[in-house]
Image: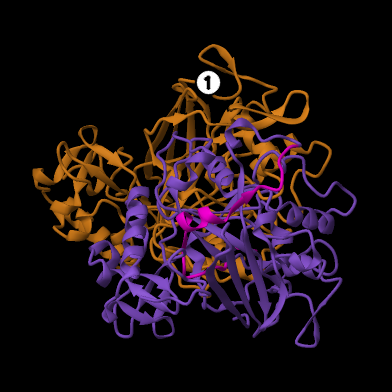
Chain colours: A purple, B orange
């Protein structure tokens, strides 16, 4: 089978997803060029006739390697037409059942921007930030696949006249452009993983939009962190890019020297990933968040999650937190892009700060390998519907 | 079948659990006196041969009512011996598969005590506390059944000489005595539940011990809330007391007049539950936390969880937060009982503040109905093992 050399979905990528052909049941496929390869047909194994990737992910690293090699061998020859569907003719589903969902806060630029916005008279970073990847648990049951509309959430926010809150639709609905990492094989209780265990336990990565109602969040979040300001919806891309593919996109971390990470977070060769996202607001590109600028690495996040003895499970999802680079057009939230609403962006010729009903946001992502190849993540798309 | 009149597990209680008889598979049972009634045998339905309560819970309120009536009818006659097992001869399992786990902070006495301990120069309650039930998502994958040992977690804590943290086993390992509420039938996205929807959606209640490493929590929790200080273990009792039984234990809420709750949190007749817990530390009773003193009700917590459009699912678990009453011997954590470690308790003749290796904590709970009947929750037991 021939895939155009400039495709973002060539044989060095091979992201997994779950799709239904017209009239068919959900099953596991791999994106190849503009087609989906039906693994339940091409490889004929029951694990690929499942409606999620979980059973395959749970088979473990050696299987991930072997199946990837089989698919690459298959693609080197003629692929039976019955195993291929144009991607535009299938329905794409949430590719995995989410076990626990954790969201980190791993971009120094993002955390500093938020600190400057919310605590203008203090140090932008809190004292713990450079010592551990700060994170919190989110709502696994409201992780949705790309294309799911997002109804504007209602909730409490600080009232205009002092401390009594008002209730109503959020007036500061925002996005957070992130990557999410999907655990393939977990670890039992009291068996922490080290950063070097990452490739054998984490199956793949997705684009993630952590929709955020800033007004609800600002009122509720002390002292136990975000809850309803985030729990209404988190969107992910339908394609899970294998960590085996992303190994070729490793880059050095930008630097963790002051302070040095504690030993449980130390890696033999600390690495990030050369992945760039784009954020489109009603079709217009407004930002290019660079994942290579992240302070904490995905492997360090995994080690942190389990160092206290917490188990990890197949289907655990953890987000990187908003990806923001040093430049003003590299910020991954409208909170930062509009500097808390003070500096509107021009979108469609109009000044804009937070999301209006009917707006659509699309995140895309591309990894660049050491040889210069481009690996696509596809997109995560969501439209804002009015509050009910 | 005759159950002693003073049993905490008479026909007005009938808590559900999952058990294995010697050599048998897990199945659903109901505790009756000192026996477990095997519902897979007594009622002969496949849903009770499942290894969790989830499938039965998902059948909904009308079924919960009907099955409870059938069991009560059955107990009024002769129960076949093959359907009964002495509770001491079976293994008890985690009774439900946890979907999302949320922990609230609904005791005014607890929140005020914590405020006084951590912010001695400020108002004990933060401005949002009386306007909404503050809560956060916890780790569903580390909810364990009573009897599971708890390995002392390791993590970062503030160092003795300034801001650089040290890593090691927690030195301030604590408990939180709580009730947990189990969602039987959830709600789709963008379909919020009102407090009055509670009885038709929440299946039952359990005892819950939210083990907490105070030193890890204190260092990590800004600005996104607790994470590793809590995520290593949460223990629940093996018996799920039906909300249908607890309807008889309703009492008025102690008072929400200043401020009045917002309309989405308002109830036609706001109610709490007359449930008293006991906390035993190495066999010695150290506290009797009264659930009837809670500020926010379980029905308000459910309404809050879904008001932003978040869906809820069968198996969602939400904890009340630490139950503390106004009296010094009614506090539900060692943090409060020892006043941050300043005022040690005498346990086994020795001054004690936080948990030592080998310690065992047992929470018990009893509801009192309007007619004076006592409904037992059983216990949630856990022993502390040394850090690995």
- The residue where tag 1 is placed is B356
> Which residue is at a point 41% across and 32% down the rendered structure image?
B381
Give A257 or A57, whichever is nearer the viewer.
Answer: A257
Q: Residue furthest bottom?
A: A349
Q: How many marks?
A: 1
What residue is at 25 percent from the left and 72 percent from the top? A41
A57 or B132, nearer to the observer: A57
Q: Position of residue B272 (x, y in %)?
A: 53, 53
> Quadrant location of the C terminus of chain A?
bottom right
Q: Residue at x 57, y 76 (%)?
A: A381
Establish if A316 lies above or below A329: above
Question: Residue at (46%, 42%) from the top-left corner?
Answer: B208
Task: Left or right? Give the position of A6 relative to B56.
Answer: right
Q: Is residue A289 visible from the viewing direction of this image?
A: yes
Quadrant assignment for the N terminus of chain A: bottom left
Q: Could you say where residue B249 lies in the image, as x and y percent from the top left?
A: 44, 51
């Amino acid at each position: 089978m021939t895939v155009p050399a400039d495709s973002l979905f060539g044989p060095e990528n091979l992201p997994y997803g779950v799709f239904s052909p017209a009239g068919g049941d959900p099953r596991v496929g791999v994106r190849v060029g503009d087609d989906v390869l039906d693994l339940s047909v091409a490889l004929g194994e029951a694990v690929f006739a499942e409606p999620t990737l979980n059973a395959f992910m749970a088979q473990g690293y050696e299987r991930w390697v072997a199946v990837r090699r089989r698919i690459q061998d298959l693609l080197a020859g003629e692929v039976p037409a019955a195993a291929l569907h144009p991607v535009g003719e299938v329905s794409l589903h949430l590719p995995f059942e989410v076990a626990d969902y954790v969201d980190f806060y791993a971009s120094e630029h993002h955390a500093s921007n938020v600190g400057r916005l919310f605590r203008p008279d203090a140090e932008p970073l809190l004292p713990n930030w450079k010592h551990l990847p700060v994170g919190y648990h989110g709502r696994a049951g409201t992780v949705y696949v790309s294309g799911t509309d997002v109804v504007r959430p209602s909730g409490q926010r600080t009232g205009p006249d002092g401390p009594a809150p008002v209730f109503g639709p959020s007036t500061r609905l925002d996005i957070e452009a992130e990557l999410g990492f999907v655990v393939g094989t977990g670890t039992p209780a009291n068996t922490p993983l080290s950063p070097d265990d990452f490739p054998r336990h984490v199956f793949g990565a997705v684009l993630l939009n952590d929709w955020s109602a800033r007004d609800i969040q600002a009122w509720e979040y002390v002292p136990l962190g975000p809850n309803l300001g985030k729990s209404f919806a988190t969107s992910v891309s339908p394609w899970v890019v294998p960590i085996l593919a992303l190994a070729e996109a490793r880059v050095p971390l930008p630097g963790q020297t002051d302070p040095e990470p504690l030993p449980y977070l130390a890696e033999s060769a600390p690495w990030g990933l050369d992945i760039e996202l784009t954020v489109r607001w009603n079709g217009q590109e407004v930002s290019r968040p660079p994942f290579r600028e992240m302070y904490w690495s995905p492997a360090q996040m995994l080690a942190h999650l389990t160092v206290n003895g917490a188990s990890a499970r197949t289907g655990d999802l953890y987000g990187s937190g908003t990806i923001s680079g040093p430049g003003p057009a590299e910020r991954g939230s409208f909170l930062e892009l509009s500097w808390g609403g003070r500096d509107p962006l021009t979108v469609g010729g109009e000044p804009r700060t937070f999301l209006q009903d009917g707006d659509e946001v699309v995140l895309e992502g591309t990894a660049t390998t050491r040889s210069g190849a481009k690996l696509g993540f596809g997109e995560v798309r969501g439209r804002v519907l009015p509050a009910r």
